[in-house]
Amino acid sequence: MASSRKSLPADSAVAVVNAALAAALAEHEGQNARVAVALSGGLDSMVLLDAAAVFAARQPIALSAIHIHHGLSPNADRWAEFCAMQCAARGVPLTVHPLQLRRERGRSLEAIARAARYDRLLAADVDVIALAHHADDQAETVLLQLLRGAGPQGLAAMPAFRSGRPALLRPLLDLTRVTLATYATARAVAWIDDESNADRRHARNFIRHQVAPLLAAHFAGYPATLVRAARHQAEAALLADELAAIDAAGVADGGGLERVRLAALSPARARNLLRWFLRSEGLQPPSEARLAEMIKQFIGAGGDAQVRIAQGSAEIGRHRGRIAVHAPAAAPFERVWEGESEVQLPGGVLAFAHAQGAGLAAAKLERARVTLRSRRGGERIRLAANRPTHAVKKLLQDARVPAWERASLPLIWCGDELAAVPGIGVALAFQAAPDEAGWTVDWRSEGPGRGRVHAD
């Protein structure tokens, strides 16, 4: 349980912080673990660095620190220098990662910086990243999520531990900011203040400076009660995920989610299953209204109707009764092939490999310019002497290639003749004879829900 806002005696604060760190590492990481402290230079991360250095002096862990240089403040260089000095004083190796941030439409610079910071931290070659979030941070996160109308996943706020390599560990999540400040005073820990933390235009800072003090004054259990509420919501979210996994059994795999299962479930379970499925595909959770519209389209649209819904950088479509997440179809393209073994195209990579008696006849490709281009409609190809000429669209449909993959699939042309369609085959006129040098083609599509097709 999170500690009271009442300040602990100095020696007790030091003991509590040290015990919280030791317990967290003992529970989640073994001996000789490589632990990196995410170090901003502020009070919280400096307390964590100091406690971790004390712990490392008597326990076999490989301790280091990582400072993310966002470059957003005129003081950013000074903060990096401060972190370097503090780490050197404690004998802790420090890595500084400068970021080059670019504004994106629809996203705040703070959100971009936060995402870039976690990307860098998660790329570190360590076993665990130790983060200095504490109980006040957790309570603020719960309040922010409440005001956004979040469900259990959001109200669970920040997990104390998230598995992975590296794992994310928040050993101070049950301790208040007051306790950390008392530790810093007792241990003579220096820190820097980020001026942006005083800017009350940001929602978190407004809650921190305007709302939280009122809550603490009127509710003796704050922030511990909200930390406890977050744990309850985390359990509820876990149970919802376990129910979704039961509902998905046998109907969800790499090819998508069967729409008939959604239709068979109660509305609440259908929404829960679709949220779980989208999250498992790496997508951000949709709003309540957008989720309802997705359910309506996936269940209500006719069996042959095409459904395409944009969600973040991906799209969600329906193909042969299954709901699938995929990359958006590539824009029309055309590219000259100059003999490369691999060609990067908008929807993936087209690979060529030398072969004998298989694939495209190499000699025939030398007679005219070879181009790789997307479908324009109306293409036809003859694949065997005993078979008629077929529409490429029909062949792709028969091969059960989804519409979004058909739009990105490169066709191989030699002059004005269609020579091959990856995944379908090589035109009869361009097939290599048994004793003839040839090229086999391998199309590796990129993005969610995509795979590999061949033309041999």
Image (tube, helix red, strand yellow):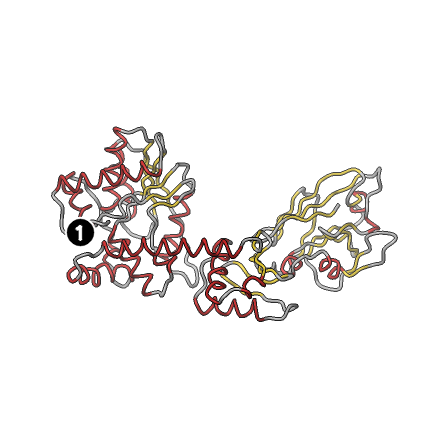
Residue sitting farthest toward the left = 9
Report which residue position mark 1 lands on: 4
Q: Nearer the viewer, residue 183 or 411?
A: 183
Amino acid type, mark 1: Ser
Callout 1 crowding tier (Cα within 10 Å): few <14, some 14–19, many ≥20: some
- Vertical placement of residue 200 versus 301, above or below: above
Percent x, y for residue 8?
13, 46
Percent x, y for residue 51?
24, 37
State the image quarter where residue 256 is shown: bottom right
- Vertical placement of residue 398 versus 301, above or below: above
State the image quarter where residue 84 is shown: top left
Residue lying at 50% horizontally and 62% vertically, measured from the top left:
311
Q: Nearer the viewer, residue 55 or 206?
A: 55
- Vertical placement of residue 410 versus 23, above or below: below
Task: Say which element carries label 1.
Answer: loop
Q: Nearer the viewer, residue 108 or 259?
A: 259
Percent x, y for residue 355?
76, 38
Residue lying at 80% horizontally and 39% vertically, measured from the top left:
437
Percent x, y for residue 383?
81, 52
Is residue 82 something that shows in the picture? no
Is residue 231 something that shows in the picture? yes
Q: Quadrant of the C terminus?
A: top right
Residue lying at 32% horizontally and 55% vertically, measured from the top left:
232
Q: Nearer the viewer, residue 212 or 378?
A: 212
Horizontal placement of 123 versus 452: left or right? left
State the image quarter where residue 346 is shown: bottom right
Horizontal placement of 346 versus 28: left or right? right
